[in-house]
Amino acid sequence: MRGELTVVWVACAVGLGLGPPASPGSLRAETVRLRLAVERSQEDSRTFAALSATLKRHNVIVYITSGSCDLGRRDACLLHYVTTGSGYRYLRIVIRDTAPPARLAGQLAHELQHAVEVAESNAANGSAVAALFRRIGSPCAGQHLTTCYETEAAISVQYQVLAEINAARRRSR
């Protein structure tokens, strides 16, 4: 049953135009706004580009879809679901894509850092992801869901990417 769900999830992603990329680790964004945010962030932020490169080295494909998390209480999250197939691990970030571009880039980087944490741990299922974040993170403030954990690395990366994006935009003016 689990293998069938993996195939269905990946098949649905392919149907949405989010299928496996030509190169491992590529970030696959659902909306034009998210695609542009990823492309521009990779150009304007060395830290963002490094996150993407790290995921590529670990054969992790990250789908980025528009939405909200924790019943609308959070703007972005890395879901604790992992699917595997063809030598890849598939992760999913859900993000509200209505934020201003710099903030959106920071939020994406934050969640990509969480994806890197999963990639580097070799977690291959939801239970392993939850155990990883219980071990390396702290419970989210004001959390509604019991599976919400935060890491210092993700917070740090978010601020670093924001600083790099803002500096790049100042230089281009």
Image (spheres, rainbow, N blue to C red):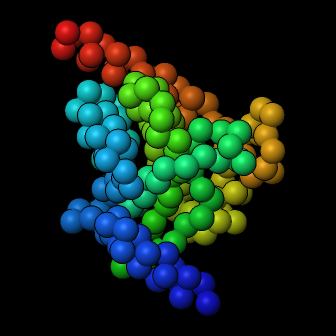
Q: Residue at x 26, y 17 (%)?
A: 168
Q: In the image, 154: left or right of 147?
A: left
Measured as percent of width and height from the top left, residue 47 is found at 35, 31
x 72%, y 48%: residue: 71
* 56 left or right, relative to 2: left
Q: Residue at x 31, y 33 (%)?
A: 41
Q: Quadrant of the C terminus?
A: top left
What number of labels is visible? 0
15 horizontally vs 1: left or right:
left
Residue 105 in view: yes
Q: Residue at x 75, y 52 (%)?
A: 147
- Residue 1 at what x, y percent from top left? 61, 90
- Percent x, y of residue 28: 35, 56
Horizontal side of 152 relative to 30 (left or right) equals right
> Does residue 98 sit above or below 35 in this rendering?
above
Residue 57 in sight from this viewpoint:
no
